[in-house]
Image: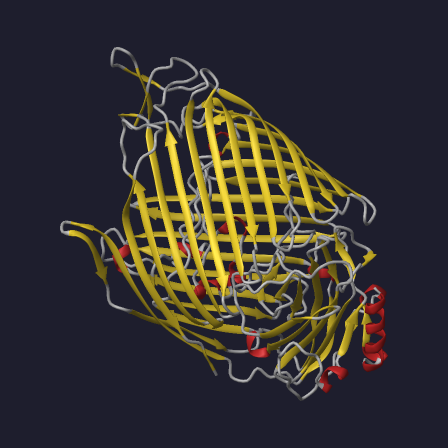
């Protein structure tokens, strides 16, 4: 501590007091200096220009406690030139070891890091995020606040602020180094990488977030309150920005990809080598606020395959995120409640065009794309998409949005029109609404149907609530979006309360949560008062000193028989006749939940979720004893290597005779080695196992079940998938990928049932991708 104080004393004369802005004293409006200079970004703040910078200091702790001074001192130096923003950071760490690894982009969540949040439109609704760890590794993305969502109290969540979307990558420079007092970082953000206002003189929203891993604390320059509905609405400002110049903003990003696929054939294993695919993207900054993107044959997303997921409820569709660079850029402009815009519906476009930005308080996004003809059933028609999204700022934090999507394939069409909004009042209260209609024509049949939702929420520090009512017609179709389950009406009431201990206490936070959740079939909602599915959840978690989190929960649930889900089920009687499968009217369950999250230690971190008790057996519509386990483990044996492993496991045991009715297992391991900041190698392996026993009418007759007229016999499906990747990415847009993937499947054998089956290689592939970013 003494050495830190002496170092601060040595630094004090260098930094003029008139340019020091202390966050805890609400000195939050900063006229940073404009200096026509440049620096070499090397992680050393020793150039004379840094002595003229504004100094931001006086950080506050935001999590786990807000409203108190940060335990670790942070200094941020800020200035700008006509073409770039510059940040210099000195992070003092007298209490514990600095966590720093050489990692791939956006992989610094387990490291100490500092995040610069820039709201260039000064609207308190959206911000760029530029994060850097002590070695200069970058993390970047955006934050767009559209309303806080409460989750069950046993689920550890980000500390009261919206998690950044890290899918977008921006070009900026950063270097960092470890020091005897902590670490030092130097950052340069070109204005070419930003969209901002067109005014001659303007103000930007600003906050700085520092994450300290050894203590689990999160500090902010602005003394933000966790109770406030908006985190971005509590930002400070950098004022008097003038003479900003992006110059010509034109990015040309040509690419070439080649994929060779292998598989068994009549003469043995063979490979199908297609022609190299030439494509690329062009991005043009029309104005400071609007960007136009165009692409032809956009690059594929197979750099890493989607992680396997369980089907917990067969009535719910699985969601997989977008990964393709063209669609990721400006993706936040297309956010809507209920995912009415889901760009993965555009499977393999030959060409696409996109316009995004913000004009006079209105954010807009326009996307047009034409899919490859070979993907249509006829092989002749091309699916054409036209998507529009606009959001208008109202008042301090409120907004009003509209969306329209149009998908045309031959004589069929799907169109969705939407209006949604959010009203914030009293700092901690908000209401949200959505009303949408789909207009669909498929095979000559026209269906028009509604979707609607209303939400009221209170985001208090010690007490919060969320009331929601949602209806989605069974005929609602979103051809350009993702609706997990149509045909339902959902009502939820969620209350939570939190107690805070003193700083340094073993128990820092204690949260309890009560959730009431009912769900009706949409067609029966007005005619039947009783909900089909009803849930009552009691849960809570404890935040312990040092970053531990322990959660427990008790769930009471009851599910009504879904005739639509089992419409193709029948019962096979001993004499060979078929009987209707009517199921029992209702299944009552109770589950016990346990979660544990460890601190982010320098070399290790882990998390576990366990759910056990009695739950619904959807295979046979019966009550079952279940186990659901999700494990996560991250090991960092050196500052260049990391091993991430996950295990997902679930099983269902019949309560009548304790036999196994079904089981799913998905272990996944990812090994990464970072040779330099730009070069890394990755190996991913995933094993998927799904198995079921002979199905029977468990609750009534014990006779075998038929599904679609076929006997529901025991089945076992398993596969092993591996991916290898060499990646060279010196800057976003300039990449070289060399990869190999292989798939092996278990051979079906009805006589083996739950026994081990041999794996046989069924497919593999090689791919290479090269793209180069030419920035003008």
Residue 572, x across and y down, in percent? 30, 17
Residue positioned most to the front: 637
Looking at the rendered structure, the number of numbered marks drawn on it comes to: 0
**Could you say where residue 7 lies in the image, as x and y percent from the top left?**
81, 73
| Residue at (57% x, 57% y) in the render | 401
Report the residue that reaches farthest toward the left. Answer: 267
Pinpoint residue 655: horizontal percent, then vertical percent. 48, 18
Of all residues, the one furthest to the top in this rendering is 575
Examine the rendering and report whether any part of residue 31 can be seen: no
- Relative to residue 57, is residue 409 depicted above or below? above
When asked about the image quadrant of residue 760, the answer is top left
Left or right, 283 with respect to 605, comes to: left
Which residue is at the front of the view, 505 or 708? Answer: 505
Colour treatment of the image: secondary structure
Is 513 drawn above or below residue 243 in the view shown?
Answer: above
Compared with 339, 283 (above or below) is below
Q: Does any portion of residue 62 appear in the rendered image? A: yes
Q: Nearer the viewer, residue 468 or 213?
A: 213
| Quarter that holds the N terminus | bottom right
Q: Measured along the vertical axis of the image, is residue 202 above or below residue 268?
A: below
- The image shows residue 727 at horizontal and vertical percentages of 43, 66
Q: Residue at x 51, y 70 (%)?
A: 676
Pick whichever, 18 or 634, lies toward us.
634
């Amino acid at each position: 501590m003494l050495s830190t104080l002496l170092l601060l004393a040595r630094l004090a004369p260098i930094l003029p007091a008139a340019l020091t802005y202390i966050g805890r004293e609400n000195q939050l409006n900063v006229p940073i200096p404009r200096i026509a200079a440049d620096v070499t970004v090397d992680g050393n703040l020793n150039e004379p220009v840094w002595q003229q910078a504004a100094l931001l200091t006086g950080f506050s702790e935001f999590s786990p406690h807000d409203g108190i001074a940060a335990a670790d001192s942070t200094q941020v130096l800020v200035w700008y030139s006509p073409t770039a923003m510059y940040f210099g950071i000195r992070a003092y760490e007298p209490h514990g070891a600095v966590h720093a690894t050489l990692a791939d982009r956006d992989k610094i969540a387990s490291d100490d890091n500092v995040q610069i949040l820039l709201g260039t439109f000064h609207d308190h609704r959206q911000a760029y995020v530029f994060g850097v760890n002590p070695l200069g590794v970058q993390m970047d993305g955006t934050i767009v606040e559209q309303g806080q969502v409460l989750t069950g109290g046993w689920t550890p969540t980000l500390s009261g602020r919206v998690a950044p979307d890290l899918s977008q990558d921006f070009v900026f420079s950063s270097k960092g180094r470890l020091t005897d007092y902590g670490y030092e970082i130097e950052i340069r953000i070109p204005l070419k990488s930003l969209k901002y206002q067109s005014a001659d003189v303007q103000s930007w929203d600003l906050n700085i977030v520092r994450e300290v891993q050894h203590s689990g604390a999160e500090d902010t320059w602005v003394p933000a309150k966790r109770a406030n509905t908006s985190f971005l609405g509590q930002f400070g400002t950098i004022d008097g920005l003038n003479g900003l110049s992006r110059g010509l903003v034109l990015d040309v990003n040509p690419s070439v990809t080649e994929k060779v696929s292998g598989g068994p054939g009549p003469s043995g294993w063979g490979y199908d080598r297609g022609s190299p695919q030439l494509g690329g993207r062009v991005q043009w900054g029309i104005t400071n606020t609007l960007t136009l993107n165009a692409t032809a044959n956009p690059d594929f997303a197979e750099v890493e395959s989607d992680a396997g997921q369980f089907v917990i409820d067969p009535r719910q569709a699985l969601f997989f995120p977008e990964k393709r660079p063209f669609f990721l850029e400006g993706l936040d402009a297309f956010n809507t409640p209920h995912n009415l815009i889901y760009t993965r519906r555009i499977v393999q476009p030959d060409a696409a065009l996109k316009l995004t930005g913000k004009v006079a308080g209105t954010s807009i996004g326009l996307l047009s794309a034409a899919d490859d003809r070979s993907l249509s059933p006829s092989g002749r028609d091309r699916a054409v998409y036209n998507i529009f999204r606009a959001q208008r700022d109202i008042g301090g934090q409120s907004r009003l949005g509209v969306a329209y999507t149009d998908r045309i394939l031959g004589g069929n069409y799907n169109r969705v029109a939407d209006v949604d909004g959010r009203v914030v009042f009293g700092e901690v209260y908000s209401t949200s609404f959505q009303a949408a209609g789909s207009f669909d024509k498929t095979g000559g049949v026209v269906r028009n149907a509604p979707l609607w939702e209303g939400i009221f929420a209170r985001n208090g520090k010690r007490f919060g609530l969320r009331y929601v009512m949602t209806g989605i017609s069974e005929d609602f179709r979103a051809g350009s979006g993702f609706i997990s389950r149509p045909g339902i009406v959902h009502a939820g009431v969620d209350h939570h309360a939190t107690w805070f201990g003193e700083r340094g206490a073993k128990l820092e936070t204690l949260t309890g949560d009560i959730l009431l959740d009912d769900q009706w079939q949409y067609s029966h909602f007005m005619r039947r008062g009783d909900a089909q599915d009803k849930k009552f959840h009691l849960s809570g978690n404890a935040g312990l000193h040092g970053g531990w989190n322990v959660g427990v929960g008790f769930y009471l649930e009851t599910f009504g028989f879904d005739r639509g889900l089992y419409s193709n089920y029948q019962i096979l009687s001993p004499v060979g006749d078929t009987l209707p499968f009517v199921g029992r009217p209702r299944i009552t369950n109770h589950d016990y939940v346990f979660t544990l999250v460890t601190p982010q230690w320098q070399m290790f971190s882990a998390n576990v979720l366990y759910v056990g008790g009695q739950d619904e057996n959807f295979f046979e519509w019966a009550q079952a004893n279940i186990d659901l386990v999700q494990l996560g483990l991250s090991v960092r044996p050196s500052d260049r290597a990391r091993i991430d492993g996950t295990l997902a496991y679930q099983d269902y045991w019949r309560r009548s005779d304790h036999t196994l009715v079904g089981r799913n297992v998905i272990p996944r391991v990812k090994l990464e080695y970072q040779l330099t900041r730009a070069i890394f190698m990755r190996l991913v392996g995933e094993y998927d196992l799904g198995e079921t026993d002979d199905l029977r009418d468990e609750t009534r007759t014990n006779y075998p079940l038929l599904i679609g007229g076929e006997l529901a016999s025991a089945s076992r499906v398993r596969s092993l998938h591996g991916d290898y990747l060499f990646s060279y990415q010196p800057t976003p847009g300039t990449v070289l990928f060399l990869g190999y993937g292989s798939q092996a499947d278990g051979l079906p054998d009805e006589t083996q049932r739950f026994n081990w089956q041999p794996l046989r290689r069924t497919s593999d592939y090689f791919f290479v991708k090269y793209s180069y970013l030419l920035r003008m």
